[in-house]
């Protein structure tokens, strides 16, 4: 009993000491505080200078980055009022964006939705796996992922798997932009100045633009980006891709001309507005995305390249497209962080030899067939020439429309 009382006594003493000590400390603090005279001058002082924001950091500095950007036509939420309600989800726009390790080049390669490609087996978040298909439309990859998973995660994963399988280009990140998000991006820069060479109308999207230099708001820009009927084109994808590329190029030029990328505060404000309705992977959080954009602040417009992967009519269906052999060079250059329009290096002969004589059938005397000539890699854009966006490679410094 005595030991218990002793323990209890020590505990009681300890508590008393702590309480007494705390009480004494409070009393001393109150006495010292009473020695200080406090006044409030906030109502009399003018506006405070704004502190300079710290430069955003790029966690992937020194490494090339490949981002698969997809346009989603989801019709839920605010998007239903724009495109009409629809429970499904598709991606009719896909752009592989390559950013060089030294941050001196940005190359954007559009993949037509009507391209016939291999669709590998895809896994969804609900445990389902789709069947691989040897040939299907490229945009079916995104919808396949959505069908087995019911979410953007599954849809984006299947699209990424398809791109990596068909191109050999590793995809580091992805971004999915819906209707509302695209409009927000355009409005965030105060509209997009763009040349409309001739009147454009499309009843499907509500597009109605007069010819001439225009500043498109978010709604008008979205209508132009989606249009492929009326006097825009024949319902195919290349004209629409061209308009999308021109819009993105105009948006880039507007951001660069307003020095948004060089002002951390303005950049954060723009990125905050532009990322509404944007779905990205965890590695592209706003802070990382802002840091990446800031590191591109000194990029030359001649080094921002837009192009559509080279295609030709599919032998099985002229309304479908297949990638030409030139596409392989572009994807290989991108994977190696080389300019995408750079010609592939030719192999150097290891030993000198006399050229083999060719038979009338086109083979060598040994009977080996001569391989077919590869399609030429599209030429690098010449800055002075006017470019047919969607069909020719061009840079943000190029002219893609005449409004004289």
Image (cartoon, rainbow, N blue to C red):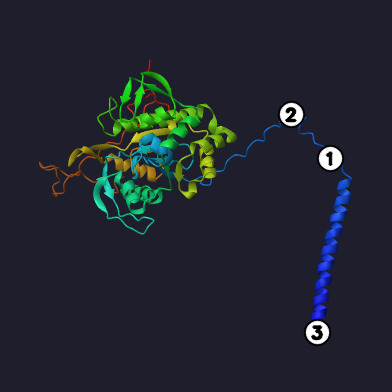
Look at the numbered disc 3 and give the secondary structure of its residue.
loop
Return the residue at label 2.
Answer: 46
11 lies left or right of 342: right
Callouts 2 and 3 close, C-beta under 8 Å: no
Percent from the top left, x then y, of residue 94?
36, 40
First in sequence: mark 3 or mark 1?
3
Callouts 1 and 2 close, C-beta under 8 Å: no
Which quadrant holds residue 45? top right
Percent from the top left, x then y, of residue 39?
83, 37
Tell me if residue 83 comes above or below residue 162 in the rendering.
Answer: above
Return the residue at label 1.
Answer: 38
Q: State how far apart marks 3 and 1 are (Cα).
A: 56 Å
Return the residue at label 3.
Answer: 1
Q: Quadrant of the N terminus?
A: bottom right
Question: Residue extending furthest bottom?
Answer: 1
Look at the numbered disc 2 and give the secondary structure of its residue.
loop
First in sequence: mark 1 or mark 2?
1
Report crowding for label 1: few under 14, some 14 to 19, many 20 or more residues within 10 A (C-alpha): few
């Amino acid at each position: 009993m005595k030991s218990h009382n002793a323990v209890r006594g020590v505990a009681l003493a300890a508590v008393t000491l702590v309480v007494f000590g705390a009480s004494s400390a409070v009393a001393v603090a109150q006495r010292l505080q009473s020695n200080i005279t406090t006044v409030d001058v906030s109502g009399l002082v003018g506006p405070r200078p704004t502190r300079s924001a710290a430069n955003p950091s790029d966690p992937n500095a020194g490494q090339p980055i490949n981002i698969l950007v997809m346009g989603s036509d989801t019709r839920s939420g605010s998007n239903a009022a724009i495109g009409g309600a629809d429970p499904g989800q598709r991606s009719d726009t896909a752009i592989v964006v390559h950013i060089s390790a030294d941050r001196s080049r940005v190359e954007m390669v559009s993949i037509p939705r009507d391209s016939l490609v291999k669709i590998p087996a895809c896994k969804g978040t609900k445990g389902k796996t789709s069947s691989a298909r040897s040939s299907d439309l490229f945009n079916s990859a995104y919808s396949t992922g959505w069908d087995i998973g019911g979410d953007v995660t599954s849809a984006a994963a299947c699209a990424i798997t398809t791109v990596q399988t068909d191109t050999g280009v590793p995809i580091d990140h992805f971004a999915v932009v819906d209707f509302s998000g695209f409009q927000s991006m355009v409005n965030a820069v105060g509209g997009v100045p763009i040349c409309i060479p001739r009147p454009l109308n499309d009843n499907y999207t509500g597009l109605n633009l007069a010819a001439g230099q225009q500043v498109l708001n978010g709604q008008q820009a979205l209508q132009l980006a989606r249009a492929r009927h009326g006097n825009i084109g024949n319902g195919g994808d290349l004209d629409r891709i061209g308009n999308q590329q021109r819009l993105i190029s105009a948006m880039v030029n507007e951001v660069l001309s307003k020095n948004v990328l060089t002002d951390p505060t303005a950049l954060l404000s723009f990125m905050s507005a532009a990322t509404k309705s944007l779905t990205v992977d965890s590695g592209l959080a706003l802070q990382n995305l802002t840091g990446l954009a800031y590191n591109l602040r000194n990029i030359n417009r001649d080094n921002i390249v837009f192009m559509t992967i080279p295609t030709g009519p599919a032998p099985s269906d002229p309304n479908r497209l297949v990638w030409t052999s030139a596409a392989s060079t572009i994807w290989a250059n991108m994977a190696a962080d080389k300019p995408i329009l750079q010609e592939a290096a030719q192999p150097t002969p290891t030993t000198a030899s006399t050229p083999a004589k060719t038979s009338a059938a086109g083979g060598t005397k040994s009977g080996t067939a001569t391989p077919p000539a590869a399609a030429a890699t599209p030429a690098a854009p010449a800055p002075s020439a006017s470019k047919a966006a969607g069909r020719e490679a061009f840079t943000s410094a190029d002219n893609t429309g005449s409004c004289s």
